């Protein structure tokens, strides 16, 4: 039997400090996630400077715990994988510097990983038989991408958001109706008590045939709705607003995803990124896939939001493909999916 390949992975692109050990790409031996949400909640969103400082305080302990829980020693590690973009530059640099120091001290290869590639790879951990090609929708706090996954390391971007990411829209709408950061999980919960068809918010599909997205108009529509009600001293039903906003997002995401599967003749569709933890989105995508004879894949919620296990999985495929970096590797806040630096 071939020797096992163990990847130690580090993720610090936003407000989660995470380290994991992943065996042969898909077996998670440990996945430690320290979330800074409670701190950023006080400010209504992620404060980059604070995120960087918190990563510095936590990274060493998080990596130690990941190693401990994995039951392996540093000798058993074959490579150190790290998110080098996209994300907050000060946050990325903490994980990157730590990974470089480890790789240098242990004399192991350093593997650069794209954060979105990590989100996509979370599906490989969850669905052990999943292989490219397939169509994937990545919906996170910073990105909304519809992608044709051609191979483990080649991606054709079919569409992306032209303004706000889906998660960003969730977080902004949440703030308008008085929910705290991050708003996505709270809208998810509150919308259960609301009527998704109570208020008709716009479904922005853009030009015919476009796979791009736009959520800023929807966000403004919610804002206008709330402001108008306030000006007239009318009560608002937050649960109805949450459910109706969410319905508008889900309809657009679902429609474009199925259309892409049909055009690219994909019998498999995967959902990825923080927003894919959303119960209603998962259910709607499952139903739409079932209706169209498409296999639906989505990771369990803890693998949807930021974590290092997904970076370890993507890092494994990058490593096996020969993608390693030297000590000059930098952080790239605006790194594009599929771009190699
Ligand atoms: O992928 P992620 O953890 O970080 C980025 O790479 O951006 O995504 C975070 C985003 C936030 O906007 C958060 O509100 C959203 O994912 N999110 C959700 C849910 N859980 C997290 N949105 C809707 N429903 C959820 N259950
Ligand atoms: Zn993410």
Image (cartoon, rainbow, N blue to C red):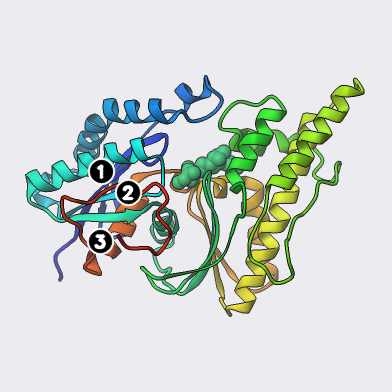
User: Regarding ligand 1, which quadrant of the image does it lie in?
Assistant: top right
Q: SS class of the residue under badge 2?
A: strand
* Residue drawn at x 33%, y 52% as measured from the top left: 311
Q: Which residue is mark 1?
A: 96
Taking the spot 46% from the left edge, 28% from the top edge, the residue there is 47
Q: Position of residue 244 (x, y in %)?
A: 78, 43
Q: Which residue is mark 3?
A: 24
- Write down the quadrant of residue 318 in the picture: bottom left
**Label 2: few (<14), some (14–19) or many (≥20) C-alpha neighbours in 10 Å:** many
129 displayed left or right of 177: left
Cα separation, mark 1 vs mark 3, equals 22 Å
Front of the two marks 2 and 3: 2
Q: How far from the left and from the top, in percent, is residue 259?
A: 67, 71
Q: Which residue is mark 2?
A: 83
Mark nearer the N terminus (2 vs 1): 2
| Image position, residue 12 (x, y; %) | 34, 39
- In this picture, residue 17 sits left or right of residue 253: left
Q: Is disc 3's CB within 8 Å of ligand 2?
A: no
Q: Is residue 156 left or right of residue 124?
A: right
**Where on the picture, by quarter, is residue 219?**
top right
Residue 22 seen by the camera: yes
Residue at (62, 49) in percent of width and height: 163
């Amino acid at each position: 039997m071939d020797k096992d390949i163990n990847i130690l992975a580090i993720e610090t692109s936003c407000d989660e400090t995470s380290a994991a050990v992943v065996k042969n790409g898909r077996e998670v031996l440990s996945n430690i996630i320290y979330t800074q949400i409670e701190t950023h909640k006080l400010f209504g969103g992620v404060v980059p400077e604070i995120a960087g400082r918190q990563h510095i305080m936590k990274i060493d302990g998080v990596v130690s715990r990941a190693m401990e829980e994995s039951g392996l020693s540093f000798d058993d590690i074959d490579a150190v994988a790290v998110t080098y973009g996209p994300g907050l530059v000060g946050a990325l640099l903490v994980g990157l510097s730590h990974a470089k120091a480890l790789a240098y001290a242990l004399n192991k290869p350093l593997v650069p990983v794209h954060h979105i590639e990590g989100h996509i790879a979370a599906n490989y951990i969850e669905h052990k038989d999943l292989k490219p090609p397939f169509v994937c929708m990545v919906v996170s706090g910073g990105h909304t991408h519809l992608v044709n996954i051609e191979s483990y390391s080649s991606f054709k971007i079919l569409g992306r958001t032209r303004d706000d990411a889906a998660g960003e829209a969730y977080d902004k709408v949440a703030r308008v109706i008085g929910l705290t950061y991050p708003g996505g999980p709270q809208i998810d919960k509150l919308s259960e008590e609301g009527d998704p068809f109570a208020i008709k918010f716009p479904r922005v599909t853009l030009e015919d045939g476009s796979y791009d997205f736009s959520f800023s108009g929807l966000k403004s529509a919610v804002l206008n709705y709330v402001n108008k009600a306030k000006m007239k001293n009318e009560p608002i039903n937050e649960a109805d607003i949450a459910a109706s906003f969410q319905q508008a997002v889900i309809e657009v995401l679902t429609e474009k995803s199925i259309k892409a599967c049909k055009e690219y003749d994909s019998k498999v569709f995967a959902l990825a990124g923080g927003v894919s933890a959303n119960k209603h989105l998962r259910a709607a995508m499952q139903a739409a896939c079932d209706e169209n004879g498409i296999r639906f894949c989505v990771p369990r919620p803890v693998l949807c939001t930021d974590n290092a296990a997904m970076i370890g999985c993507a890092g494994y495929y990058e490593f096996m493909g020969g993608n390693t970096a030297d000590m000059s590797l930098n952080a790239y806040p605006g790194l594009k999916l599929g771009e190699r630096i």
